[in-house]
Amino acid sequence: MKKLALIIICLASVGCAWAKSDITLDELCSGKYYGKRIAGVNPLNDGISYARLSDDRKQILTYSFKTGEQTGVLFDVSQTKGQKRLEQIDGYIVSPDEKNILIQTETQQIYRHSKTAVYYIYNVANKTLSTLSDGGPQECPVWSDDGYMVAFVRDCNIYLVKLLFNNSESQVTKDGEKNKVVNGKPDWVNEEEFVNDRSLCFTSDNTLLCWIRYDETDVPLYSFPLYKGLEPELEDYATYPATYEYKYPVAGAENSKVSVMSFDIKSHQTRTMKVPLDEGGYIARIFPTSDETKLAVVTLNKHQDRMDIYMANPRSTECTLAVRDNVDKYIGENAYNQMQFFDGGFAMCSERSGFNHIYIYDLNGNLKRQATEGDFVVTDFYGYDPKTGACYYQSTQEGPLYRAVYKSDAKGKVTKLSTEQGTNSATFSKSFGYFMNVYNNINTPPVTTLCDSNGKTLKTLLNNQDILDDLAQKNVGAKEFFTFTTQGGTELNGYMIKPTDFDPQKKYPVVLFQYSGPGSQQVVDSWYTGNCGGCAFEQYLAEQGFISVCVDGRGTGGRGAAFEKQTYLRLGKMEAEDQVETALYLGTLPYVDSNRIGIWGWSYGGYCTLMAMSEGRSVFAAGVAVAPVTCYRYYDSIYTERFMRTPQENPDGYNDSPISRAGRLSGNLLICHGLADDNVHFRNTAEYTEALVQADKDFKEVTYTNRNHGISGGNTRKHLYRQITQWFITQM
């Protein structure tokens, strides 16, 4: 009997070694499945090297693009001279001549893109470290082209530091004041919706400093409470809570009045550019050009369907229209986010053909050529080589689910440079002779390689094999792409994850995840589709017995302007219909329990969740809306008016909302929101839940103290995902 017991114990031990485990909430919330990336990569002037942050963030190292071998050390915290000793660094900005480096430390995030930090000037040759400024943390520093000056923003004002004069500091503007005037950096709404944290540059001859001035005096003030909380604990609010106030224009409200300024560094004269701007118009960007008499000023009209590029003379203040781009309905973000200037000209993207493509101009606005064309979307623009006339870009030429890297030469011949199908992104050397490619697909975490100008792989730097090894020991289901056609005749793309022990003879509950916002895409052949990397949260739901599904409805990206802009003036209507259509389609599958289909989403996805649950067809047993917009009258002006115009122009579009549909809510609802959400204010949930109460609709609400739109910190994200999971387990 003892021998038999020993044999049973041994067999049980072997069985445990073979058994696969489940992904845990702790694991997926720790970020372990996102995959390692090489941080802080910056191509260097020699055209064959790049700099990067060391993994421990104590060094800035240089590497060869050709071999991937380390070639030097630009900075080392243990080798600096001076009074200050650093433990590690958060980032760096190399001067154009590569003789000095701005070292970023003590970083504090402000909003999505903006931050304050304490910067140091590091001299590469003599290894000395000196403070950029002793007056307090700085924002958005920028080097002059000659590398002898740095401009930055502090407390809404611009400061200038001259290295040749012993880092002497002078204050350029004095009218800056919080919630009144902001110089050199965007206010909240311009930062968020034009995806920019700096509006400050030097002219190419280093004689003038130029910036956008935002006068937000007349913008309505918004406030929300801050409590003591935990992780972090705000001791100053232990007795009484505080109020955070900032300027936030909702749809139809007054925006900042914007102007472009220049400052003559020698004479100290400040000038205002005579930029022609429609009433309520925007200045999305300013760019220095190779001609010091031409500052490129990118403007948009209030409806955001016309973009003008003016060449402003920073001395005479006169402005000349170079390019006017009119498109149907609205200008997409790629138009100004992917604009690049080079010696004698610039490249920009436009949807004027119905698909986003690259156009090359000289500085006078003469079109030299259209660099890309066809029924596909340019999704990223990496650069233009003025020596050869070649353009380098990422696009959907293989289909809307894929991203590949391409070269279009001066004659329009297109060469695919990436080799694997899935999602590829590139960082090119300054000579365009080499590039670092990051490849991934829905089953493959990021693989980082170095390639030559023909796309040949020279070396693999990182492959995240440890993630694949870990997942090989987990109970993970297969990921499948699919398409179906709605009753209205629209073909939609989706993906599905089934439980590991999937049995086609059984019926399973389904959880739909979606975002659905204009131009967004969730259904992409990428490791980062889904949640937490590698669809880790979707796999976690599969472990609980759910089939996880995601479908991109009408209005989403990757398929051209006509498909994306269908939702114009009626946000939420078609998107909700398509999620209902998805549920109806899934209900026809023999292995789906049509009575147990749930839906959830975050931000716009939360909004679409509420719209779909109150669409009129009761197909969802349960839903979770995280940080949702509940009425676009409450959301910011630039984003909302881009797609909806103003409430005064489009009352019917605004009136159709989750709040107006509250009485039609069907299914068990959980709504979650951070109380310090500066983007989608908690007001949205407060007003919506009151509408539900008065409509006598039951729901559950979870709020998160001091959390912003990302709802993270400490155990917060883990708690949120557990609430979502348990809601679907108990309510379906």
Image (cartoon, grey):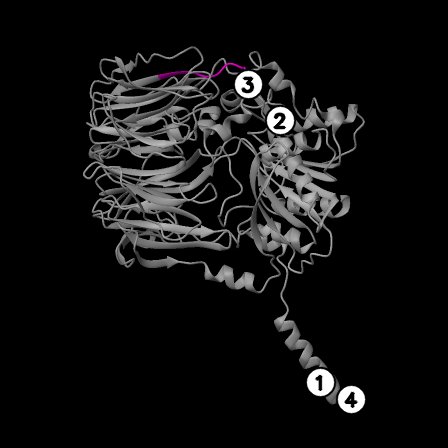
Asked whether 371 falls inside the magenta stretch, the response is no
Pinpoint residue 389: horizontal percent, then vertical percent: 22, 37
Q: Secondary structure at mark 2?
A: helix
Q: Earlier in the sequence, mark 2 or mark 1?
A: 1
Q: Which of the two discs, 2 and 3, labels the residue nearer the N terminus?
A: 3
Q: Which residue is mark 3?
A: 251
Q: Mark 1 = which residue?
A: 6
Classify the position of the N terminus by image quarter: bottom right
Nearest to viewer (mark 4 / mark 2): 2
Which of the two discs, 3 and 4, labels the residue nearer the N terminus? 4
Q: Which element type, helix, strand or loop, lies under badge 3?
A: loop
**Most prominent secondary structure in the magenta stretch?**
loop
Q: In what quadrant of the picture does the C terminus appear?
A: top right
Pick the front one: 476 or 377: 377
The earlier-in-sequence mark between 1 and 4 is 4
Q: Secondary structure at mark 4?
A: loop
Q: Looking at the picture, how far across and down is residue 605, in whole percent? A: 60, 35
* Mark 4 or mark 2: whose residue is earlier in sequence: 4
Quadrant location of residue 13? bottom right
Q: CA distance from mark 2 to mark 3?
A: 19 Å
State the extent of the magenta-drawn residues as a range. Answer: 252-259
Is 516 situated left or right of 417 in this image? right
Relative vertical location of residue 560 with respect to residue 52 in this rendering, above or below: above
Q: CA distance from mark 1 to mark 4?
A: 9 Å
Q: Which residue is mark 2?
A: 573
Give the percent coordinates (x, y) of residue 613: 70, 33
